[in-house]
Amino acid sequence: MTGRWTYRTSAAGVIVLAAAAFTLSYDALHQLALDSRVRPALAWLWPVVIDGTIVVALLTVLAAKRAATRAAYPWALAGLFSLASVAFNIAHAPERPVAQLVFAMAPVALVLTTHLLMQQVGWRPLRPGQTASVAEHVGGPEAAHPHRPGGHRAPEPVGLDRTAPVAARARVQAAYEAQLAAGQTPTGAGLARAAGVSERYGQRLLAEFAADPTRAGYPNGDRLAGRHRSDDASRDDVEGR
């Protein structure tokens, strides 16, 4: 099975499990709403409010990570409504420990599978034009390190783009300037998430920009010199290898 099919099968499995967990939790919360004398025509909204808030909050966390901004509030919201969903499911269960555990598992599974789906969505598929570090991920160490014993250099993989480190640097710089303009304090991890590079590369450029902000873009003709000095190291760092 190829990596792409593995990813798709895993994602489909997570979606099915999340839907099953939501359905089980929905039924328990719906019955609890009816038992609490919520109007039958509106009782179906009660589980949507509880479990739907969990899903939306976790998706907001993913959006905040991609925007390199704080996600404390959506995390708190997801935690609060997760605890509420578990408590309400247990309240609907018969007064037996095993039954209460059975009912509690559905909302717990909903939270965990939704979070797992978020992680899968955050994984970037491999594309042509990535650096040698991606070649290592695809073809092993020999693809990433073309120098072999005896002084011979292996042929460079087709499709490698030598401009990738320059493009990655531009993305990090743009994220750095955008966060400064928004009054935020840039971090290596935040820049890495915003630019789609490794955290090590984000931290390295952050240190460089912070040491001399006026040279972040290599103005006055210095850009080319900076590119020559950093290209080799960048190819190893962009993807975290």
Image: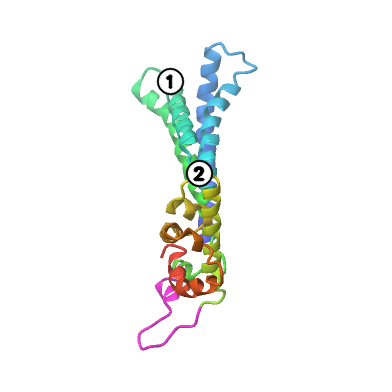
Measuring from the top left, give residue 89's x and y in whole percent. 45, 23
Question: In this orientation, which residue lies closer to the viewer: 188 or 207?
Answer: 207
Q: Amino acid at mark 2?
A: Thr
Residue 88 drawn above or below residue 19:
above
Residue 222 counted in the magenta span? no
Helix, strand or loop status at disc 1 = loop
In the rendered view, does 109 fall on the left or right side of 41?
A: left
Q: Is residue 1 visible?
A: no
| Residue extent of the magenta highlight | 139-156
Q: Residue at the location (54% across, 70% down)?
A: 223
Q: Quadrant of residue 84?
A: top left
Q: Which residue is mark 1?
A: 93
Within-10-Å neighbours for mark 1: few <14, some 14–19, many 20+: some
Q: Residue at the location (56% across, 26% down)?
A: 49
Q: Residue at the location (50% across, 69% down)?
A: 131
Q: Amino acid at mark 1?
A: Ala
Q: Quadrant of residue 163?
A: bottom right
Mark 2–mark 1 distance (CA, rounded to whole Å):
39 Å
Q: Which residue is mark 2?
A: 69
